[in-house]
């Protein structure tokens, strides 16, 4: 791709993971001219970066993108990250989606009656932009006092791969969500683990998985009066986490007040040494490429009408979490929010609405 602008595009989708592909599916059905820009060298979005043992919360049959059910992974009810990566790669080929990679968007700007997307491979000009960059590129670590003084190893969920390298070590896992529980579960089999959370972890009932969570989120979106997903708890009891609970490994302690050069310390003066700290403390939306549009409010959020940016109606956001649509950061939820976004784009373009 050269450096000259491409002026023949209705829509530029920034991000080639699950949300971007779902948007591409509906854009294809709407007969829009579009391109998907992905900064990765290979298909699969962030799924290729997850730790080795990660599995979905839902069976394959309940984890599809629009149009094509995910095939089952032989011998496993809950698909692995590798299986999801292969599924997304085949999804691209199946629907002949125009993905350009590796192409990183560096800025989206207004250009009269269009938006210009500056990238590492030139500039695209489009009537609409769909941002689907997700959160994996922006891991969040809280500013705990003493973090810069700690002399042991610190890593985030994005850096973790497998427990073997921590065998026999004293490892602190920080965080009260699913990633923390799953990583703690397997680390506790080979290392001396301590789990730190800001509040007591809330384990979901054993019979709750992604199928239930999506149904609850759907009812909530449709105006149901029952509680949301958060009322069920924070941690899905996948088999590895249930096993860790049953052997007593899921005992959390209150979050430490600070880090020391050799470990952690609490407000009551007690301390503990640690060889490594794994921060399972979440992510923030990767939105730096949108800064030239100045779409943020005083709190750093992007006000939305559905998926459409209120400050720039030619910009749409999909796949970043519940604030861009219930369960929109999940495989099955990405399709629903992408369909709604493309329907609005299609209206503006005068194209057919996705069916």
Image: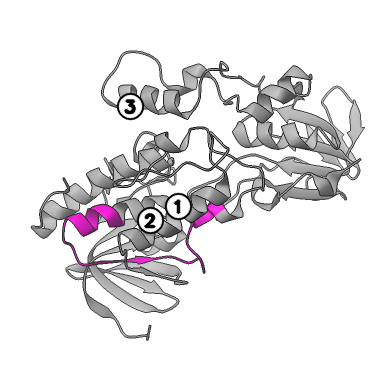
Q: Give yes or no for contact between labels 1 and 2 (Cβ–Cβ under 8 Å).
A: yes
Residue 327 pos. (x, y %): 40, 35
Find the distance from the CA under tag 3 to the CA under tag 1. Answer: 24 Å
Residue 302 seen in render: yes
Which stretch appears magenta? 24-47
Residue bearing the label numbered 1: 87
Q: Secondary structure at mark 3?
A: helix
Report x, y in % for residue 57. Answer: 52, 33
Q: Residues within 10 Å of mark 2 (few under 14, many from 20)?
A: many
Identify which residue is drawn at 41% across, 51% down: 18
Question: For residue 269, which quarter of the picture?
Answer: top right
Q: Secondary structure at mark 2?
A: helix
Residue 157, percent from left and from top? 66, 46
Q: Residues within 10 Å of mark 1 (few under 14, many from 20)?
A: some
- Find residue 175 and report its horizontal and vertical position in percent: 67, 33
Q: Is residue 41 within the magenta segment? A: yes
Mark 3 neighbour class, 10 Å CA radius: few under 14, some 14 to 19, many 20 or more: some
- Identify whether 2 is placed above or below 336: below
Of residues 167 and 126, the one drawn nearer to the viewer in this rendering: 167
What number of labels is visible? 3
Picture residue at 42% right of the left edge, 42% below the top: 331
Q: Earlier in the sequence, mark 3 or mark 1?
A: 1
The question of residue 33 being in magenta is answered with: yes
Is residue 177 found left or right of 1 in the rendered image? right
Q: Is residue 234 left or right of residue 161?
A: left
Vertical placement of 10 versus 189: above or below?
below
Secondary-structure class at tag 1: helix
Residue holding disc 3: 218
The residue at 69%/43% (across/down) is: 143
Question: Would you name the residue on which mark 2 appears?
Answer: 91
Residue at 66%, 40% in the rendered image: 280
């Amino acid at each position: 791709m050269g450096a000259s602008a491409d002026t023949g595009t209705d829509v530029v989708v920034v991000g080639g993971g699950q949300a971007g592909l779902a948007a591409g599916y509906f854009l294809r059905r709407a007969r829009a001219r579009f391109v998907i820009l992905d900064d990765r060298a290979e298909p699969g979005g962030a799924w290729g970066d997850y730790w080795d043992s990660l599995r979905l919360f839902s069976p394959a049959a309940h984890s599809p993108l629009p149009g094509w059910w995910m095939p089952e992974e032989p011998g496993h009810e809950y698909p692995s990250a590798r299986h999801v990566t292969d599924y997304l790669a085949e999804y691209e080929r199946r629907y002949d989606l125009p993905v350009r990679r590796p192409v990183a968007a560096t800025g989206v700007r207004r250009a009269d009656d269009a938006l210009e997307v500056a990238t590492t491979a030139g500039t695209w000009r489009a009537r609409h932009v769909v941002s689907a960059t997700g959160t994996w590129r922006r891991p969040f670590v809280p500013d705990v006092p003493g973090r810069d003084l700690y002399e042991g190893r610190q890593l985030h969920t994005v850096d973790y791969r497998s427990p073997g390298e921590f065998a026999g070590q004293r490892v602190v896992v920080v965080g009260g969500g699913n990633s923390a529980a799953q990583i703690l579960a397997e680390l506790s089999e080979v290392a001396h683990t301590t789990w730190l959370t800001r509040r007591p972890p809330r384990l979901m009932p054993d019979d709750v998985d992604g199928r239930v969570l999506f149904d609850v989120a759907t009812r909530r979106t449709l105006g149901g009066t029952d509680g949301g997903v958060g009322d069920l708890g924070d941690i899905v009891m996948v088999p590895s986490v249930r096993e860790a609970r049953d052997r007593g490994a899921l005992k959390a302690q209150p979050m430490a007040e600070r880090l020391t050069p050799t470990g952690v310390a609490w407000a009551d003066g007690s301390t503990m040494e640690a060889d490594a700290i794994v921060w399972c403390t979440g992510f923030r939306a990767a939105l730096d490429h949108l800064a030239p549009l100045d779409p943020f409010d005083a709190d750093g959020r992007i006000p939305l009408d559905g998926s459409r940016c209120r400050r720039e109606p030619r910009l749409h956001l999909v796949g970043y979490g519940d604030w861009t649509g219930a369960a929109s950061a999940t495989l099955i939820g990405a399709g629903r929010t992408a369909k709604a976004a493309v329907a609005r784009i299609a209206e503006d373009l005068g194209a057919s609405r996705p069916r």
